[in-house]
Image (tube, helix red, strand yellow):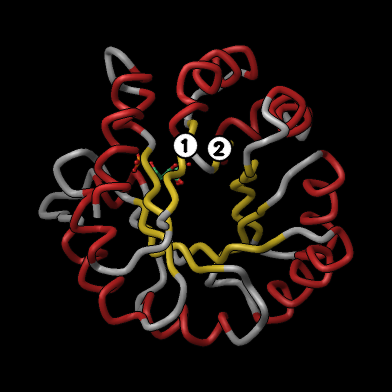
Amino acid sequence: MAKLQVAIDLLTTEDALALAAKVAPYVDIIELGTPLIKNMGSGVITAMKNAHPDKLVFADLKTADAGELEADIAFKAGADLVTVMGAAGNATIIGAVKAAKAHGKGVVVDTIGYPDRVKRAREVTDLGVDFVELHAGLDEQWTAGYSIQVLIDEAARAGVPVSVAGGVNLSNVTEVIKAGAQVAVAGAAIYGAEDPAAAAKALREAVDAV
Ligand SMILES: O=C([C@H](O)CO)[C@H](O)[C@H](O)COP(=O)(O)O
């Protein structure tokens, strides 16, 4: 069964906890966005895990160096999954995987900005990561001509465990899952909705219907 991940790109622990309280019944993974962690520090990870011990807490660190050290900080704070940049060297990813094994947790590689996301996804899967995020970041989404279809096509040919992030919403989530993504990541479609709980519920139902 595919998973639904809410990406919380809000800026305070208070707002993140308030959103999570509304949408947690409908999601499998609660992602703390990079801006949120940069603004609030690792304490937001602890606060979220304490509030939702039954959910996977995903710390979107986007680590580019010192993989073992940064991952260790997040795992100690309560994260279940951390991200490392696909553009980082393999040594950084291997370091994060080492920390994950020590804590019984996992690593996700984020391919944001990488020229050939599928190629990198296949390479890093061999390094022991849990899955790879085929990701078009917020800046890329706001670039003229962007379409999530490129990520859907990549998911269909990846051949390794992937998530898709970059404008997932109710109109495309079915295609994302049908393409083979194990996790659909939705940020603005949930936190930007007038009724985030209703938005998360609708996405949950669409994911489960595939
Ligand atoms: O990871 C993200 C981005 O880099 C900012 O932290 C987003 O959470 C991710 O792109 C999903 O958000 P949406 O594209 O708004 O669904």
Q: Quadrant of residue 62?
A: bottom right
Q: Nearer the viewer, residue 81 or 61?
A: 81
* Residue 151 at x, y percent in the picture: 26, 64
The secondary structure type at the circle numbered 2 is strand
| The C terminus sits in image quarter | bottom left
Residue at image position (47%, 36%) is: 27
* Residue 14 at x, y percent in the picture: 62, 12
Residue at image position (34%, 38%) is: 204
Q: In the displayed structure, would residue 153 be above or below residue 176? A: below
Residue at image position (55%, 37%) is: 30
Q: Is mark 1 within 8 Å of ligand 1?
A: no
* Dot 2 and dot 1 residues touching (CB under 8 Å): yes
The label number, if any, that marks residue 137 in the structure image: none
Residue sitting farthest toward the left:
145
Crowd rating for badge 2 (residues with CA inside 10 Å; few <14, some 14–19, many 20+): many
Q: Which residue is mark 2?
A: 30
Residue at image position (79%, 63%) is: 100
| The N terminus sits in image quarter | bottom left
Q: Quadrant of residue 99?
A: bottom right
The label number, if any, that marks residue 27 in the structure image: 1
